[in-house]
Image (cartoon, rainbow, N blue to C red):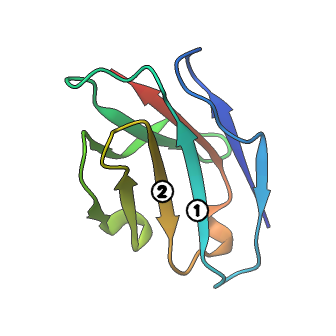
Amino acid sequence: FSVAVAEVRAQVQQKPSLETTEGSAINISCSHPNKKNIDYIHFYRQLPGQGPELLAAGIRRSKDVAGIAGQLWVSPDGRSSALLFRRPRRRDAAVYYCALG
């Protein structure tokens, strides 16, 4: 299945799309070189026919994301991040957004 990603602001950069097979781990990475210390990194997803849903937010540390059985990872310098899906399923096929705020 395919996972689409979208750039929400000019301050973040993401690949336009990713593909994986069900159960194979995947990272949705985000680059934000101009992130300030107080900026939170937000990952959203939008399932077909629904509005955006906040999955995770963080500043500089990794944490588990129960909604996707995965993890939000943030680099020590805060300039990059990723949403790790350990065992993605077909129902996770959606558009994923990264944003700063």
Could you tell me how many numbered marks the image carries? Answer: 2
Residue 28, percent from left and from top: 59, 54
As drawn, the residue found furthest toward the left would be 38
Name the kind of residue labelled 1 in the image.
Asn
- Is residue 88 shown above or below 41? below
Q: Report the front residue among 27 and 23.
A: 27
Left or right of residue 87, residue 90 in this image? right
Residue 98, percent from left and from top: 50, 35
Residue at figure coordinates x 60%, y 77% from the top left: 25
Q: Earlier in the sequence, mark 1 or mark 2?
A: 1
**Which mark identifies residue 75?**
none
Q: Quadrant of residue 96?
A: top right
Q: Quadrant of residue 21?
A: bottom right
Q: Residues within 10 Å of mark 1 (few under 14, many from 20)?
A: some
Q: Residues within 10 Å of mark 2 (few under 14, many from 20)?
A: many
Residue hosting label 1:
27
Residue hosting label 2:
83
Q: Report the front residue among 2 and 99.
A: 99
- Is residue 93 shown above or below 96? below
Name the kind of residue labelled 2 in the image.
Leu
Q: Are marks 1 and 2 in contact (CB under 8 Å)?
A: yes
Residue at figure coordinates x 68%, y 71% from the top left: 90
- Viewport quadrant of the C terminus: top left
Residue at figure coordinates x 55%, y 26% from the top left: 12
- Viewport quadrant of the N terminus: bottom right
- SS under mark 1: strand
Residue at figure coordinates x 57%, y 49% from the top left: 29
- Is residue 61 shown above or below 70? above
